[in-house]
Image (cartoon, rainbow, N blue to C red):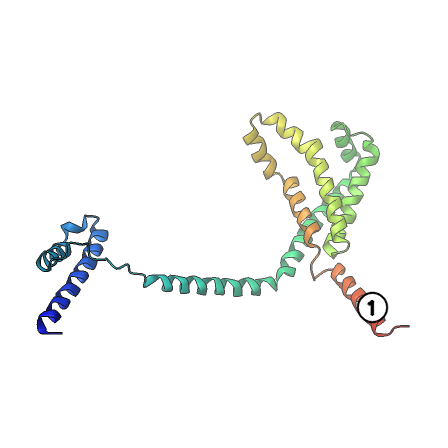
């Protein structure tokens, strides 16, 4: 390659770099590429060396691997944090069971302490057999509250208490809100804010996940599992 060819190659390379600069200037300043100095230099080089075709403009993809690595590091750190937090799921479950259980237990104590008033409320709601239903509901809430705090028969008790809350929503909360709020938006907003709706959702969550490791249910399951292992290791 003689000096002339080398000079042509160098100038063409400069033209490509000028195109690249033109692209950058147009993206930054939001103006057409021909309005930048780099574009004028590229046009001059093409006209000088007979290049009528558009020179290729390289696309800078150097940032893509960096973004992928950043996302990979983020998801890796997120996964480690989530795994470490999963070790404390028993604590959240215990907190939930103790809170809901004590709420039902304390409420049932008050209802049984003034059973006549509780029964009169059921009569006012038009519930048939209020003299029998009211004490039964109070006893269910009392026993269910204690069972939730201990983590004993958690799924069954949570289901019973969830049905209790559904009954309260259908007979008391729902009709009262329907009379007070005519629009569907206002009715649903206040319905979802009610404690009975929230308790029903939390109880259904306990029905699905169970009592967790810090409970009598878990202790009983471990005892049964160890007894089965001993029976399997010592066949008759």
Residue 152, position as x, y percentages in the image: 77, 55
Which of the pair 228/175 is nearer the observer?
228
Q: Closer to the camera, 138 or 234?
A: 234
Horizontally, residue 196 falls left or right of residue 70, namely right
Locate residue 49 relative to residue 157 in the image: left or right: left
Instruction: Say if 128 sits above or below 103 in the image.
Output: above
Residue at 38%, 61% in the rendered image: 67
Q: Quadrant of the N terminus?
A: bottom left
Where is mark 1, residue-wise?
Answer: 227
Residue 165, given in percent of the width and then of the height, sits at: 70, 40
- Residue 23 is at least partly visible in this image: yes
Instruction: Work out whether residue 128 or residue 47 is closer to the camera in this orientation and state it.
Output: 47
54 in relation to 79, above or below: above
Residue 113 visible in this rendered orientation of the protein: no
Question: At x 74% / y 56%, what residue is drawn?
Answer: 151
Residue 27, position in %: x, y? Answer: 23, 52
């Amino acid at each position: 390659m003689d000096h002339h060819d080398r000079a042509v190659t160098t100038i063409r390379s400069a033209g490509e770099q000028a195109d690249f600069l033109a692209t950058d200037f147009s993206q930054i300043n939001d103006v057409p590429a021909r309005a930048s100095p780099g574009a004028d230099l590229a046009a001059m080089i093409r006209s000088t060396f007979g290049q009528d075709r558009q020179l290729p403009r390289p696309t800078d993809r150097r940032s893509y691997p960096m973004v992928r690595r950043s996302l990979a590091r983020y998801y890796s750190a997120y996964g480690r944090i989530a795994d470490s937090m999963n070790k404390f799921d028993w604590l959240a479950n215990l907190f939930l069971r103790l809170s809901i259980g004590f709420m039902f237990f304390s409420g049932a104590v008050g209802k049984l302490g003034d059973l006549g008033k509780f029964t009169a409320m059921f009569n006012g709601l038009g519930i048939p057999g209020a003299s029998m239903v009211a004490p039964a509901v109070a006893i269910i809430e009392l026993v269910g509250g204690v069972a939730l705090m201990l983590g004993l028969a958690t799924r069954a008790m949570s289901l019973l208490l969830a049905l209790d809350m559904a009954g309260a929503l259908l007979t008391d909360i729902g009709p009262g809100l329907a009379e007070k709020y005519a629009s569907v938006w206002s009715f649903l907003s206040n319905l979802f804010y009610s404690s009975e709706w929230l308790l029903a959702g939390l109880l259904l969550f306990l029905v699905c996940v169970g009592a967790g490791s810090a409970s009598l249910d878990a202790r009983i399951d471990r005892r049964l599992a160890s007894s089965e292992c001993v029976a399997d290791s010592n066949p008759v």
